[in-house]
Amino acid sequence: LQFDALLIRQITVHLLILCFKRFNRFSNWLVENDKLEEKTVLLTKFQAALPDLSIILSCLTDINNRQMALPVGCERDFKLLILSLLTLLNQYVVSLSDINFQFPNLSFFNSLLDKSNFNGIDLILLNFYFNLQTNSSSSINSNVSKWWIKSNNSNSLFTCLLKLNTTN
């Protein structure tokens, strides 16, 4: 995840997501067959083999910075990689219960809330973002999660969500 080539990052993130899916499937099978000791051993080994969460968060911050550095109206964006990273973070939270992390303040989501029209990937990104905000230790201090605070476009989160309901 620390490579400069974005394709390598995308493939790595997808491999990690697939590992989590296989782990969850096998872990559920162990629970169904009353093999809780084996599940504990599997969880310990799986968690030791995973990259540190700080690496994934730094990758997300780097992609956020690259996205925000693009000129306005540029066709290129990094939404798919951001979505993949958020999916991976969600897998960490769901599969490994003792995860505690500080979600970075990403200006990408502030600019996403300032949009007047949302498409499908924008809605999925916002859904993952708000879910991870609630599981993060930084959610208390986040201005994005405070629905009454206006953003740069002078729309609060509440106003954006109301507009979302009426425009789509």
Image (cartoon, rainbow, N blue to C red):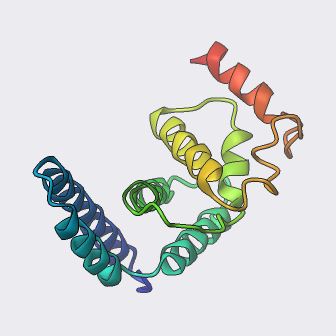
Residue 162 horizontal/vertical position (percent): 72, 20
Image coordinates for residue 72, horizontal then vertical, percent: 68, 54
Residue at image point 46% right, 58% down: 93
- 118 and 30: which is toward the camera: 30
Q: Nearer the viewer, residue 47 or 37?
A: 37
Between 25 and 65, the one lying in front of the other is 25
Residue 16 visible somewhere in the drawing? yes
Image quarter of residue 15: bottom left
Q: Is residue 108 left or right of residue 51?
A: right
Left or right relative to 156: residue 1: left
Q: In this view, does 122 lie to the left or right of 158?
A: left
What residue do we see at 17% from left, 53% from top?
25
Q: Is residue 26 left or right of residue 73?
A: left
- Taking the view exactly as shown, the residue that stands out farthest to the left is 33
**Can the viewer see residue 73 in this picture?**
no
Q: Residue at x 48, y 54 (%)?
A: 79
Q: How many marks?
A: 0
For the C terminus, which image quadrant?
top right
Image vertical order of residue 122 relative to residue 34, above or below = above
Q: Which of 117 and 12 is in front in this view?
A: 12
Quadrant (top left, top right, bottom left, bottom right) of the N terminus: bottom left
Where is residue 5 shown, x and y percent of the image? 38, 81
Quarter-of-image position of residue 95: bottom left
At which x and y percent is residue 10? 34, 68
